[in-house]
């Protein structure tokens, strides 16, 4: 789970196991902490891709209950995070991690 703003990247949190709807709700706390870390305060607009976990009722309820403004973004080819994923994958691939621990460390280093 990663966050970024126009100013800089936010936190990267590794999710162990399969990412499902129940796990998706927990990172909301990471969202709020990232907003604080990025000095966004409580007035920011949040945008996710259209993965079904992000658009699930429980996720939308959490965002609504926590007063998070969400930007609808139906086109994945125009989504900024998709371009960052490509860059991150390329950078990580060039460093050839040999195990999961190394992969996580390299991802976090490259995300900074």
Image (cartoon, grey):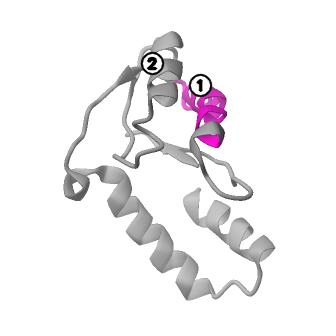
* Residue 22 can be seen in this image: yes
Answer with left or right where residue 90 lies relative to residue 106.
left
How far across and how far down the image is residue 66, in percent? 53, 13
How far across and how far down the image is residue 44, in percent? 41, 21
Alpha carbon separation for disc pair 2 and 1: 9 Å
**Dot 2 crowding, Cα within 10 Å, few <14, some 14–19, many 20+:** some
Disc with the residue nearer the chain's start (2 vs 1): 1
* Residue lying at the far front of the rendered structure: 57
Answer whether residue 7 is magenta in the image: no
How far across and how far down the image is residue 87, in percent? 42, 70
Answer whether residue 32 is magenta in the image: yes
Answer with left or right where residue 30 lies relative to residue 101.
left
Q: Marks 1 and 2: in contact by CB < 8 Å?
A: no
Q: Residue 68 or 110: which is nearer the viewer?
A: 68
> Magenta segment, which residues?
23-39
Q: Residue 28 or 87: which is nearer the viewer?
A: 28
* Residue 9 can be seen in this image: no
Residue at horizontal 52 percent and vertical 27 percent from the top: 58
Placement of 88 over or under 81, stated as above or below = below
Task: Tell me the residue that label 1 is attached to.
Answer: 32
Residue 18 sits in quarter: bottom right
- State the SS at label 1: helix
Answer with left or right where residue 27 lies relative to residue 69.
right
Placement of 6 over or under 12, stated as above or below = above
Chief SS of the magenta region = helix
Residue at horizontal 59 percent and vertical 56 percent from the top: 112
Residue at horizontal 69 percent and vertical 74 percent from the top: 103
Task: Tell me the residue that label 2 is attached to.
Answer: 68
**Dot 1 crowding, Cα within 10 Å, few <14, some 14–19, many 20+:** some
- State the SS at label 2: loop
Residue 26 sits in quarter: top right
């Amino acid at each position: 789970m990663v966050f970024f703003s126009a100013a800089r990247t936010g936190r990267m949190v590794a999710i162990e196991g399969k990412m499902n709807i129940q796990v998706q709700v927990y990172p909301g706390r990471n969202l709020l902490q990232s907003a604080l870390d990025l000095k966004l305060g409580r007035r920011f607009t949040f945008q996710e891709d259209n993965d079904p976990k992000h658009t699930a009722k429980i996720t939308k309820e959490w965002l609504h209950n926590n007063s998070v403004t969400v930007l609808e973004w139906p086109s994945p080819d125009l989504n900024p995070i998709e371009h960052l994923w490509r860059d991150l994958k390329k950078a990580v691939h060039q460093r050839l991690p040999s195990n999961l621990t190394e992969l996580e460390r390299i991802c976090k280093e490259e995300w900074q």
